[in-house]
Amino acid sequence: MRFDTVIRNGTVVTATDTYASDIGILEGKIAAIAAALPIENTGKVMDAAGMLVMPGGIDAHTHLDMPFGGTTSADDFETGTIAAAFGGTTTLIDFAIQQKGQSLRQAFETWMKKADRKAAIDYAFHCIITDLGDAQLEEMGALIHEGVSSFKLFMAYPGVLMVDDATIFRAMSQAAKYGGLICMHAENGGVIDVIVRRALAEGKRAPKYHALTRPTSTEGEATGRAIALAEMAGAPVYIVHLSCNDALEKVREARDRGVPAYAETCPQYLYLSLEQMEAPGFESAKYVFTPPLREKWHQEKLWQGLARDTLQVVSTDHCPFCFKEQKELGKDDFTKIPNGGPGIEHRLSLIYTGGVHGGRFSPNRFVQLVATAPAKLFGLYPRKGTIAIGSDADLVVFDTNAEQVISASTHHMRVDYSMFEGIRVKGVPKSVLSRGRTIIENGKFVGKAGSGEFIRRQTYSGM
Ligand SMILES: [Zn+2]
């Protein structure tokens, strides 16, 4: 036996098992999992003594190089994927946005160009549907066949991204027919718009009103409606960036009845709260994203949701805008602040810290949440999301005892602030491999922009 790389002496952790083993890698794939693998003819030997060896993270929700409100998210596919790699993420699923009147294919091709020769890790796309005519409805089947097997629809942002219930129902029916999965941005956009206009009329223009005009009940209502529509269509549904207990209860109730409803949350909803919106001056614009931050008590409910499988996935909704010049577009009017926050780099560390060190769940559940569940739901498994013979050698050597204080002065995202500034995490990726190539080694990026590949995903087949 010879291998290109052997990772020795680590503790392998998957969504189901924890055991001491070496891992042998050949031609980008995991070729052997056994104790004391021979290393005589091995190209590279990595020592993982005292470390966990886990499957590479999968971030199912990112927005790189995304136009929004007259500007573009600050990370492109090069800087964003390098920052992701530092954080132990080896695959991301970004969103190709259909402009009104466009074919879905045009959207897909536009985003393929954005990623081409830039991405340092593997990537895939969901397609955001904003305009579903008969032609686009037909296209859904073809796109699923080509590996774009999930679509996102918005119940918020009327006049821009929002679609009506009939459109959601048609899309869900079509997705169910061809093996696709519909992702829902669940907020009642019509109601929010009325509340926002009232606030502006009363002269409420500071960033905190972004949060105060989007109450949790609007997310709860839309989440319940999305699930009801999915049931009517006989389709599964995936709720993105779930932020509050109102919505969590809707998902819990549906899952208890056996409905294939899934949901993700993001680190910002687990670590930050409305208190951040009380920051002086314009500072709180750093936390303007949708859904907004909630009262602090929701955090523990979300952690419990992750532990009890009401929530299946942690993604980031990484959508960075610099404080200077970008967030400042809304200096005098919160509705003009670009919506989004940076988070692609610290997902694993934040979830390991709060989840495993916090005593809320096991390292196996951690792997499930950040890698295995998104791989299964979005058709990447078992190529990605686990450690098994034949799987891509996307691996993270994770030091559970290393500590780091998150700061914009040391992070790798191309954005001038951190949402998690000053938060101390325990559990840091030491080395990261993408299809067998080392891309992070001892805290340094040693990969190459452009070496990431587009991954054609399989159809939805449940968990
Ligand atoms: Zn998003």
Image: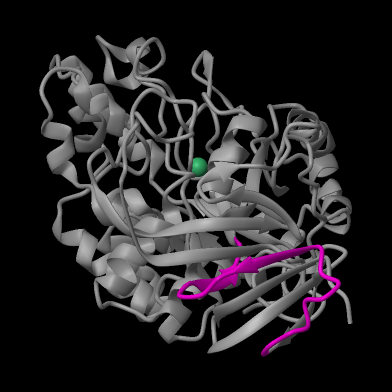
Viewer-closest of 202 and 425: 425
x then y, percent, for residue 112: 79, 35
Residue 140 visible? The answer is: yes
Q: Dividing the picture into quarters, in which one does residue 206 lie?
A: top left
For residue 310, above or below residue 190? below
x then y, percent, for residue 312: 47, 71
Viewer-closest of 335 and 189: 335
Viewer-closest of 19 and 460: 19
- The quarter of the picture where the C terminus appears is bottom right
Q: Residue furthest front?
A: 40
User: Is 275 inside the magenta-drawn segment?
Assistant: no
User: Viewed as shown, does residue 96 lie left or right of 319?
Assistant: right
User: Viewed as shown, does residue 292 lie left or right of 254?
Assistant: left
Q: At 80% from the left edge and 29% from the top edge, which residue is drawn?
A: 113
User: Viewed as shown, does residue 207 lie left or right of 442?
Assistant: left
Q: Dividing the picture into quarters, in which one does residue 376 lie?
A: bottom right
Q: At 59% from the left edge and 31% from the top edge, which residue is drawn?
A: 79
Q: Which residues are magenta?
A: 35-56
x then y, percent, for residue 116: 80, 33
Q: Dividing the picture into quarters, in which one does residue 449 lie?
A: top right
- The quarter of the picture where the N terminus appears is bottom right
Q: At 75% from the left edge and 26% from the top edge, which residue is drawn?
A: 101
Q: At 51% from the left edge and 69% from the top edge, which residue is drawn?
A: 262
User: Viewed as shown, does residue 203 lie left or right of 45?
Assistant: left
Residue 17 visible? The answer is: no
Q: How many marks?
A: 0
User: Is 49 inside the magenta-drawn segment?
Assistant: yes
